[in-house]
Image (cartoon, helix red, strand yellow):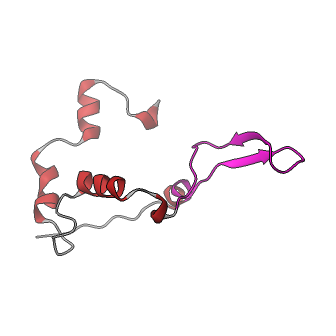
Amino acid sequence: MAFATIQVPDVANGLAEAQTSIVYYDDGKTEMARIAELDREPLPLASIPKHLQHAVIAAEDRDFYTNAGISPTGIARPSGRPSAAATSRVAGRRSPSNT
């Protein structure tokens, strides 16, 4: 079994950590505007309901809690079907990042 690594571009890291700027009136409480490319705010994991945490993990790796950190079937799965990007190109659709 072989593994490949890629370097994540620095710009992607900046986008992953991007937050919304909130502008308040001079009273310091009344919100005037939210300014951002993406509207997101970091949340502590404890504030996300357990059932939602488990749902996201199950969607990504249903064996997350039982495998040893590597899922051979998860690694092999993409080799048997075209990627979403390739499927979008074949179907003539544009990806959300290109709109």
| Residue nearest the observer in this picture, 78 or 30 | 30
Find residue 83 and report its image quarter: top left
- Image quarter where the N terminus lies is bottom left
| Residue nearest the observer in this picture, 5 or 38 | 38
Q: Position of residue 12 (x, y in %)?
A: 49, 56
Marks counted in the figure total 0
Pick out the residue farthest to the bottom.
Answer: 68
Residue that appears at 10% across and 60% down: 73
Q: Is residue 21 above or below residue 72?
A: above
Q: Look at the image and say whether residue 41 sits in the magenta stretch.
A: yes
Residue that appears at 49% across and 60% down: 47
Residue that appears at 12% across and 57% down: 76
Per the picture, the main secondary structure of the magenta-coloured stretch is loop
Find residue 57 and report its image quarter: bottom left
Q: Is residue 31 left or right of residue 54?
A: right
Q: Is residue 76 above or below residue 67?
A: above
Pick out the residue farthest to the right.
Answer: 26
Write the start and end of the magenta stretch as one range.
Answer: 14-43
Q: Is residue 68 left or right of residue 19?
A: left
Q: Is residue 23 left or right of residue 83?
A: right
| Residue nearest the observer in this picture, 66 or 5 | 66
Q: Look at the image and say whether residue 51 sits in the magenta stretch.
A: no
Q: Position of residue 8 (x, y in %)?
A: 42, 62
Residue that appears at 44% across and 57% down: 48
Q: Position of residue 46 (x, y in %)?
A: 46, 65
Q: Position of residue 27 (x, y in %)?
A: 88, 48
Find residue 87 and report its image quarter: top left
Q: Is residue 80 above or below residue 71?
A: above
Q: Is residue 34 left or right of residue 1?
A: right
